[in-house]
Image (cartoon, rainbow, N blue to C red):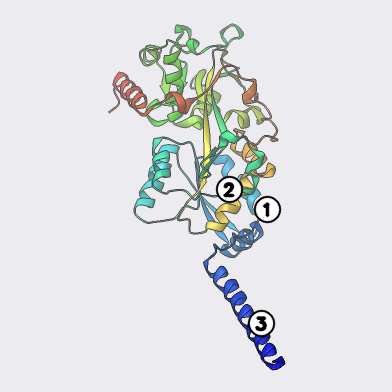
Amino acid sequence: MTGILATLRKWRHTVFATVALAAVFFGAATSAPAQSSWSDVVAAAKREGALTFYHNMRPAGAEPFLQKFREAFPEIRAEQVRLGSAPLIERFATEFAAGRHIADVVLTFPDERMYEGMKQGWMEKWTPPELGAFPDWVNVDNQMFAVQTAREAIVYNKNRVKRNEIPTEWTDLFDPKFKGRIGMNPPWRSVAVQQIIAFWEDKGITDAAERLKANNVRFFEGSGGIMQAVIRGDVDVAHITDLPVNPALADGAPIGVVYPKSGTTLSNAYVFVARQAPHPNAAKVFVNWLMTREGQEALQTHGGLSVTRKDAPPLSHLPATSQLSNTVDGEKILTPERQKRIVDTWRQVFGIR
C-alpha cells in the first residue's frame, strides 16, 4: 500500500510539473511580445547610424539645427532635403506611392494631402517619451505632432517708412501712400498666405486681390525673399509669415514688425516619422530629441518660429503667441473649396495661368 501511495504521489508531481511547463511555454508563445524600452530604441537607432530629414525650415537655420542633433547623437548621421511645403508634400506623396521610401522624418506645414496621407498609412503611430511636456492639441492621433507655430504679420523698413506712416492694420496694405512700395508672397504658392486672405475675407475685406493690384503689389518667393526685399529697400512694407523675422531682428536688420490688433492667423508645423522609414529607430530618436527642451530651443533659435513645448522660452525678439490679439488657427478657416476659390481668384486678377 505504501508503495502504491508513493507511486501515485510521484505520478501526480510529474503531471503537475508537465502542465505547469506547458502553461508557461504556450502562454509565452501566444501572448503579445513586450514592447521595446526606449533604451532599446536608442541602441537600435545608433546601430542604424543614419536618417534623412525632409523639411521646410529656413535655409540658414537647418544645418545648425541638425548639428545640435549630431552633437547629442554623434552616432547618427543626419542628412536633409529642403523644399517648400507644397512641393515637399508632393514629393513625399509621390515617393510613398511608388514604394521609394527615402524620408525618415518629415517636418512641414500641412495641407489636405497630409491628412489624406494619414488615412493612406504615411505615418508611424507611436508615443514619443517627451509628449507629456506638450499641450494635448499638438497630438494628432499619435501620428503627427505640432512642434512650431508661424504667425502672419506686417514688416516694414525703418529707414524708409516715416514714423507717421508705420502700418498698424491689414487695411494699411491697401493705402495709396504705399503704392509701388508693397510686397507679399504670392498666394498661389503658400497655404499661409491663403489662410490670411481667408481671415481678411472674414473681416469684410473681400476684394484684397483687386486692391493690392491697384496698389502695384510686388511678389517675392517665400518669406525669406520677402525679408530680403524689405531689407534691401525693393519694397518698404510687406505681408510676411514670420519665419525669418526673429533671426533678422537678432542680426540687427533695420525692420519693424506689426501683428495687427484685429488679429492674425496661425500655422502649425507638424513632424512625423514615416511609416516605411529606412531608419525607423533613428527617426523616432530624432523626433523625440526635437521635442526635448534642448531640441525645441534649437528649433526655435535656428528655425526662427515659436515652438509649442510648454516650458520652452519665448522668441528672443518677438512676442509669444499668447500675447497676440485674436489669433485664429488658419487650418480651421481654409477649407479645400475656399482654398481653390482664393487661388483661382488671385491667379485671374494677376493674369497667372
As drawn, 121 above or below 325 = below
Q: Nearer the viewer, residue 15 or 40?
A: 15
Q: Position of residue 232 (x, y in %)?
A: 53, 25
Going by the numbered disc 3, the residue's amino acid type is His
Quarter occupied by residue 249: top right
**Number of numbered discs on residues:** 3
Circles 2 and 1: CB atoms closer than 8 Å: no
Q: Decide: is 279 above or below 241.
A: below
Residue highlighted by disc 3: 13
* Badge number at residue 143: none
- The correct choice, above or below, for 184 with respect to 129 in the image is above
Q: Secondary structure at mark 1?
A: helix
Q: Is residue 237 visible?
A: yes
Mark 1 or mark 3: which is in front?
Answer: 3
Characterize the local packing of mark 3: few (<14), some (14-19) or many (20 or more) Cα atoms within 10 angstroms. few
The answer to whether 131 appears left or right of 212 in the picture is right
Residue 37 in the image: x percent, y percent?
Answer: 64, 59
Residue receiving disc 2: 127
Mark 2, Cα crowd under 10 Å, few <14 / some 14-19 / many 20+, is: some
**Mark 1 or mark 3, earlier in chain:** 3
Three-letter amino acid code at disc 2?
A: Thr
Residue under label 1, please give it.
72
Q: Give coordinates of residue 264: x percent, y percent.
A: 53, 20
Q: Is residue 78 visible in the rendered structure shown here? A: no
Q: CA distance from mark 2 to mark 1?
A: 21 Å
Q: Is residue 216 left or right of residue 260?
A: left
Q: What secondary structure is marked by label 2?
A: loop
Residue 159: name its quadrant. top right
Q: Nearer the viewer, mark 3 or mark 2?
A: 3
Location of residue 270 in the rendering, given as x and y in whole percent from the top left corner: 52, 39
